[in-house]
Image (tube, rainbow, N blue to C red):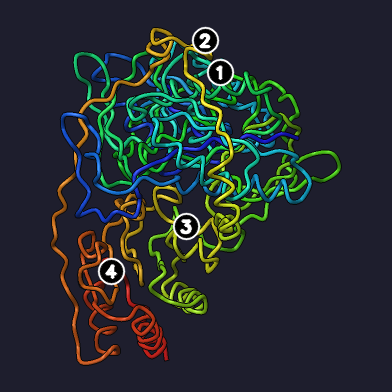
Amino acid sequence: MILAATWDTDGLGRAALELLGAATRLAVELGDQVGLAALGTAAAAEAGGHGAARAFAIEGDRSASAGDGTIAALAELARELSARIVLLAADEQGGAAAPRLAERLSGTAVTHAIAVEVEDGRPAWTRPVFGGKALSRVTASFEPVVATLRRGAFEPALPTGGSASVEMRRAPAGHGAVELIGSEAAGEVASLEEATVIVAGGAGLGTPEAFSELEELADLLGGAVGASLAAVDAGWAAPDRQVGLTGKVVSPDVYFAFGISGASQHLAGIGGAKAVVAVNTDPDAPIFAAARLGVVMDGRELLRALVDELRGGES
Amino acid sequence: MHAVVLLKQILDWELPPQRFRIDPQTKRPPDGLAPKLLGPFEQNALELALQLEQAGTVEKVTALLAGPADAVEALRKALAVRADEAVHVEVEEVDALDPSQTAELLVAALRRLGPPELVLAGRQAGDWDHGQVGYLVAERLGWPAVGLVFRGESRDGRLHVWRIGPSGVEQLAVRPPVVLTVTSHTDLRLRMGSVIDLMAANRKPIASWRPDELGLGSADLAAARRLELGEVWVPEVDRNCELIEGEDAAEVAARLLDRLAGLELLERPA
């Protein structure tokens, strides 16, 4: 069994469909079946229609992102199914779960994979290293392999018309060593992962005030605000706005990069964008190499002009 | 509470991509390509440990590193910002170690140290970017782990930590022993050591342990390996950026929006 596991509850999101897509292709090459585990029945119920032969809903872990119960339940399920491969999204939860899951299954964790090929019956995983400056290929010495897949790197599973009844599994009670006290959830702030337009700023904007102008442009375009590591480190933007290898991996239609130089670790987060618009005073900035459209100009100046132009268009 | 910070020395991560190279023989950057520095997230982890010590939550901070001889510089740096003690597990060719082997060495060293109540690790080392070691150490010690932490505080007998969760910042209460993996944050920029501290750091002893002293012979280390590294290469970048120009910012803005609309990437609000 190749098991895709997601923390989704109400339905399968894009990342979960990408896991299913990768699982389906691996299953064909390895002559195996696909299973999906989700945290909600509604999400699990969609798996059968996207290539999964079996679907599992894990219940009982109420503070799932903090708790250990989901990881314990997934380990148990992987054992029960003799899973050869477990696929997770390379996000906050998947990144924390994969090494622990691999350890409990005496297997191997492979993180941040962007491609996989089967060579001599074994999957070989491609993953970025050195902050995205280089790529590496790795194979696992011990099965199962618990791999996290970078968002946007794999084609999502298409509807198959199939179905699978949802089997329930209960998460064991955690040992209580970690308790979720509360979350200052992003709330009304638009989700970066789901956004079709992202307006992102970096150190080149020069001032924290520029971020309120980014908000303005994002509002006008119905998009979300993102930030480079440098801007987050400077305290100009909240940490959950960070885009990059160590932040969110995004796949909008348009990604505006204002005053972002384009460090490899940032580029690693925007590879899934249909088009990057680079705005930087330095024409040699690496961001232009990743961009479809570019403007050599002070980011803040263009930011204001775009806001004016869009405002003008409205009146 | 005794806190141990897991450190790593890595190639300067600010090295621009156009200067970055991989030696296909060794599968790593050639020696001397750029200076080696204490990794960025390790700096954040060290800073968090020092802040917890200042707040009285932690009584002692030990810097622990498994790496080659020259990585001792990272431990000196930790002592220069007033880490209390430093331990070097000296291994050859640390880049050849996979996360499982690194964790094996660190766990053995942690056991010999005590073990402590709190272990802090960077979220991922900025060279191989696995992001596994902190979690593997936690599993092998049988401890819980909390990832992507950027703040900690002692409250009602528990350690409260703030971390990046899937949909925003989460506050968690943990009962040590626990492993925290630390992410970057504006409050976690590593402090500068004073000249006096720097000089004192050069005189402080650094414990140096060999793997076999920790019960790990070369066969044990080889058996701990889980990942086989294949090819490592620098991808080629194709430049096909179309520049938008104009007389002034307003014209550029209008042209840019038109072009994006023309590419059917953006609808211009009517």
| C-beta proximity under 8 Å, tags 1 and 4 | no
| C-beta proximity under 8 Å, tags 2 and 4 | no
Which comes before the other along the chain, label 2 or label 1? 1
- Badge 2 and badge 3 both on one subunit: no
SS state under label 4: strand
SS state under label 2: loop
As rendered, which of A138 and A123 lies closer to the eye?
A: A138
Type of amino acid at the residue the image marks with label 2 = Gly
> How far is disc 2 from disc 4 in space, using C-alphas?
53 Å
- Residue B215 has which mark? 2
Q: Position of residue A22 (x, y in %)?
A: 32, 31
- Residue lying furthest right: B156
Marks 1, 4: nearer the viewer: 1
Type of amino acid at the residue the image marks with label 4 = Ala
Q: Position of residue B143 (x, y in %)?
A: 65, 24
Q: From this view, report whether residue B3 is shown above or below residue B36.
A: above
